[in-house]
Image (cartoon, coloured by chain):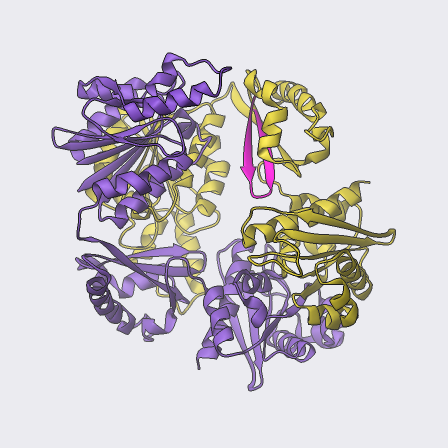
Chain colours: A yellow, B purple
Amino acid sequence: MKAELIAVGTEILTGQIVNTNAQYLSEKMAEIGVDVYFQTAVGDNEDRLKTVIDQASKRSDLVILCGGLGPTEDDLTKQTLATYLGRDLVFDTGAEEKLSAFFETRPQYARTPNNERQAQIIEGSIPITNITGLAVGGLVSVDGVTYVVLPGPPSELKPMVQESLVPLLSKSGERLYSRVLRFFGIGESQLVTVLADLIAQQTDPTLAPYAKTGEVTLRLSTKAPNQAVADAKLDALEQQILRTDGLDGVPLQTSLYGYGEDNSLSQVTVELLKDKHQSLTAAESLTAGLFQSRIADVAGASQVFQGGFVTYSLEQKAAMLGISEEDLHTHGVVSDFTARAMAEAAREKVGSDLAVSLTGVAGPDDLEGQPVGTVFIALASSKGTEVRKVHIGGRSRSDIRQIAVLHALNLVRQTLLT
Amino acid sequence: MKAELIAVGTEILTGQIVNTNAQYLSEKMAEIGVDVYFQTAVGDNEDRLKTVIDQASKRSDLVILCGGLGPTEDDLTKQTLATYLGRDLVFDTGAEEKLSAFFETRPQYARTPNNERQAQIIEGSIPITNITGLAVGGLVSVDGVTYVVLPGPPSELKPMVQESLVPLLSKSGERLYSRVLRFFGIGESQLVTVLADLIAQQTDPTLAPYAKTGEVTLRLSTKAPNQAVADAKLDALEQQILRTDGLDGVPLQTSLYGYGEDNSLSQVTVELLKDKHQSLTAAESLTAGLFQSRIADVAGASQVFQGGFVTYSLEQKAAMLGISEEDLHTHGVVSDFTARAMAEAAREKVGSDLAVSLTGVAGPDDLEGQPVGTVFIALASSKGTEVRKVHIGGRSRSDIRQIAVLHALNLVRQTLLT
């Protein structure tokens, strides 16, 4: 099946946003064995969109359009495609009910004719439910070409692709199975160096590294008739990888923190806290609530987290946590002493099993003679307090704070696993 | 001038990478007043690339190709374009010297015919020097269409665009000037409804709305010979917009919180706190530190923020803030009473001028009979405590928390402006 993607939206053509949907859709199509041969982006212009649709219908079997399903005048994807196909737009009952429910709880928002269009589909379409938004998508086949219409926002498009489109399009027989290994504490270039031979000689499964802020993932992929056959092949490669030593002589197994595309250090850590019935609190300086916010991102966090402190200034470290101001001045806020005192005080005040503290130099300026990126992280427990000093170099203020949070989550994770 | 971009590379079509060059090139073209009407991505396939080039040459004046200039078998952009235009590939002296120098220092690398191609340009081209890599780019005009060829890696493409392509293409005189108006508290569809006439009749300047999570921006753009002329035109349109009433009869001016592409509610709020020498603390329930983390995102936040509380559970609201547990149970944590009590207690404990609290239902389940998205936000000051109840409907847990933070920032902002 030859597929092509059409992203609709002037904001793409003016360079205001990056077209990430094209990458996501291509990846998902590849997983089910559908080849994407062309990706196009076009603005909110009926004539140009029609040109692109026409060209696509001549050279591809599957045409996926995304964007332009919203409630403004610029949103014209559905009606342009409908006009091109010579069909009407009709209301989808489920989408219409959702639209009504949305406006019922918002008396201050007006329900305009533009909004109505979000609940319409091209006549003859299979509706594709929008789980996180209002605009319903659809799939319709006309003259041997299948057209799919999806909304632009990735937070809406992704669940629709995952839950509806992929099942609709998947062929029985071989498909692509992937396994994602997630690593923290090793950089992408180091990973690629120690796995150079495996990467160079890869045939089946394939392996591809991807770097994110502060972490690296390895995607292993193989085509197989079913999960069991796929797992056998993936297991073999995974074992080879995890037995490989890093440049420090420690096996990569040590840096592996979890599996899965949508996983994260916060998810893994909260799951471990839940499994081991351990509660957690925190006292944060440079991260200012980001660590606790990430804990609360995870469903069920309330089982392990009741609250904590943001002690951004020296004075509030003293006032909220009862640490002597004189000691703070003597040792400095960026110190082993202060991280330790913060964690132990927080643990005592909240009465939790574990307590994390973060104190350091986010930048852009040095602090107390300590360079930007110096962070002390402590974890207090009934067994005592461990302090780690990390240096996060060559990064923006925002990245330093994010990576400091990852180090803290990893410290909790490793402690729970020992 | 009508431009179109062609990104060449199978890794784009398999979804392995995101096509960020398209966004970068579009942005740079917009800055010099060149409109990009189509963006296409195609794989390392000579036939399909030729099809795309042919189509582009018919509908565009400027065709920019990037990718496929490297030394491997898959790299075929230059030769495909050369074949299409009926021209030879010839060596560019500067590039050839650079290639020779590269291999002189690397006796272990073989200099293959594939490598040679990196130093070649289409006959009649103006070479575009590659500052950070080996593959030379080029610009050539044939039959009224200008073709530009650039390498794929952004680290090579960007300097070439900045240093060579933009000067080559800029007309002396006019360029595009933009102004971004940022709104909170009005949805994109409402904004577009009340500005329908202005949007429909727009000529110069143009105006385009863009929705982000919880906020809307309006980009006004005009071509002008200098900033002063641009400002005069932009000012006139801006005034028209801000005088327009929302559907609630309140002028849009009221929902305007700031200007600029890279601005944010947190930035604007912290700047106001600094200007008015007001300090701030917070007690957060559902947002769990996200509000305070956003305050600390802004440079200089330490001048106005010393720290605060994350009171995620009912028990910690009582323990950390001294609120009676019985009262919390009686009124519920999702209530006017609790929001008020949290803000007032936090203000007293930290001794700040202002204190914000957030308590509500992030989801996915209802809480205390209150639907998902119900959030109470309070702001305590020397003048008393204001409480706002907001309903953030039809959103994910993560979005509800983010938008609750925006509401809280806006409450602080509006209070500081009265």
Q: Quadrant of the C terminus of chain B?
A: bottom left
Q: Residue furthest bottom?
A: B383
Residue B246 in sight in this render: yes
| Above or below: residue B375 compared with residue A246 | below
Residue occupying image coordinates x 19% and y 63%: B229
Looking at the picture, tell me which residue is in the foreground, A149 or A250.
A250
| Above or below: residue A394 compared with residue B49 | below
Percent position of residue B354, x then y: 58, 78
Residue B182 found in image quarter: bottom left
Residue B199 found in image quarter: bottom left
Give the mark count: 0
Looking at the picture, tell me which residue is in the foreground, B374 or B250.
B250
Residue B147 found in image quarter: top left
- In reply to whether residue B7 is colored magenta, the answer given is no
Q: Main secondary structure of the magenta part?
A: strand
Percent position of residue A124, x then y: 32, 37
Q: Quadrant of the N terminus of chain B?
A: top left
Looking at the picture, tell me which residue is in the foreground, A143 or A67.
A67
- Span shown in magenta: A206-220
- In reply to whether residue A208 is colored magenta, the answer given is yes
